[in-house]
Amino acid sequence: MAMARGGALVAALWAVVLALSRPAEATETNDNYNLRGGARQGGVTTTGLDRMCSSPSFAKVVTGGKPTCILAHAASVLPDLTHAVDALAQTSSGVKLTSVLAPEHGFRGAQQAGHGGKNSTVDPRTGLQVYSIYLKGYEQILSLMQKDGSQVVLVDLQDCGARFYTYIWSLYDVLVAAAGSKVGGQGAGYPVKVVVLDRPNPLGGERIGGPVLDADFSSGVGKRPLSMQHGMTIGELANLFNEEYVGLEDFSKGNKADLQVVTMENWRRELSFTDTGLPYVPPSPNLPTPTSVYLYVGLGLIEGVNISEGRGTALPFQLIGAPYMGWEYADALRKLQMDGTEVREAYFVPVMSKHANQTCGGVEVSLPPKGGPQGELDAIRVGIQVIKLAHDMYKDQGGFDWVKSGSRYWIDLLTGNELVRTGIESGLQVDQIVAQWQHELEWFKILAQKYLLYQ
């Protein structure tokens, strides 16, 4: 990928871009990008789904009255917690809903990491057919999108702001499949339109950080260059994907998807999820609270080492430990005084995943009152500090080790390159590790600015 070179040049370009950035309303350069409606009174954020369900006539305009399927999951809910599928399946909704597509964890969110549920099942509440698209190829996804005659795909997914969270890549797969529907001989012979119902980035939209994915490390947890904390809503990502990357896939043959984004109202980049007034529904089983989401973009890196990240406990991505760790680790970590966090010594027994049914020593990481992603917290830096300290304390004792996925180190796939792992192994300090990706990060910030829909 073409990266911006030279610190001074990058800084100058970034300053120009920021100076020329326009309010969200002025970013509407293509009618396919934004479908806007009236703002709700008060400070509660109005999601794209809420706007669709509040106006059947608007919903009919969005879908064109055509047969429509929806990519949704457990967190696809309205403010009153009614599920998107339950609402849109009503004949009065203005949407001709034909079927449901499910990402990782399944449509109703019952599956653990790495599972998407049954390939095909029937939703007992609505009677709609549910098809899993998790780990499916583009041709198969297109077939499932069109299986019941759908000409429109709604996407209503609550992302968590981390590049390695797979929902954004399910969106990417749908966009590529839709672009491929324009190619003769692929699919059912008619093009499919994609409509993304936008939702908040729970981390807010001000902080963009972490390494940018290197193409050599493309995988199911990162297919195209994004920074690890991308700072974008799923609607903004859809526009970026469609304009920058979708046409590069062999299946799309240079085409872009026919894409529309139904934007939110009353969302600003400084808002983290708890500021939106929306109810929190876990987007996946191991992100049970907003705190777990705020920490996940950094502490999710622990999946790449032989330390429990708290799966199988009540506090995933807050409890961190292993059988070979003890009180000395907690004391050392507390001395690092990681900004935006509180750390206590902790012991736990996971009932599943790494070190299941073994007593693990370690720490609980929490946030101070009023703490969160828009304050001092730099979760990626915290994640690197946690792993580096464990490496330095326990590697030579035969405790700490890196987890592999086939021939690749899993942490390399999570971070998108080797820089964190090799930096830790070579004895670099955290500041030195972070400094390695700053040029690429500035390049991504400039790229992302082109697709931001909100101030």
Image: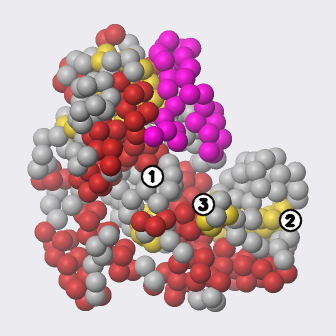
Q: What is the crowding at mark 2: few (fewer than 14 residues within 10 Å), some, or many (at least 20)?
A: some
**Residue hosting label 1:** 202
Q: Quadrant of the N terminus?
A: bottom left
Q: Which mark is residue 323?
A: 2
Q: Quadrant of residue 16?
A: bottom left
- Separation of marks 2 and 1 at Cα, in angstroms: 33 Å
Circles 3 and 2 in contact, beta carbons < 8 Å: no
Q: Position of residue 300 (x, y in %)?
A: 60, 60
Amino acid found under the numbered disc labelled 1: Pro
Is 223 situated above or below 71?
Answer: below
Q: Residue at x 45, y 40 (%)?
A: 137
The secondary element bearing badge 3 is classed as: helix
**Which of marks 2 and 3 precedes in the sequence?**
3
Is 223 situated above or below 113?
Answer: below
- Separation of marks 1 and 3 at Cα, in angstroms: 15 Å
Which residues are drawn in magenta? 110-137
Q: Quadrant of residue 411?
A: bottom right
Q: What is the crowding at mark 3: few (fewer than 14 residues within 10 Å), some, or many (at least 20)?
A: many
Question: In the drawing, does residue 274 fall left or right of residue 317?
Answer: left
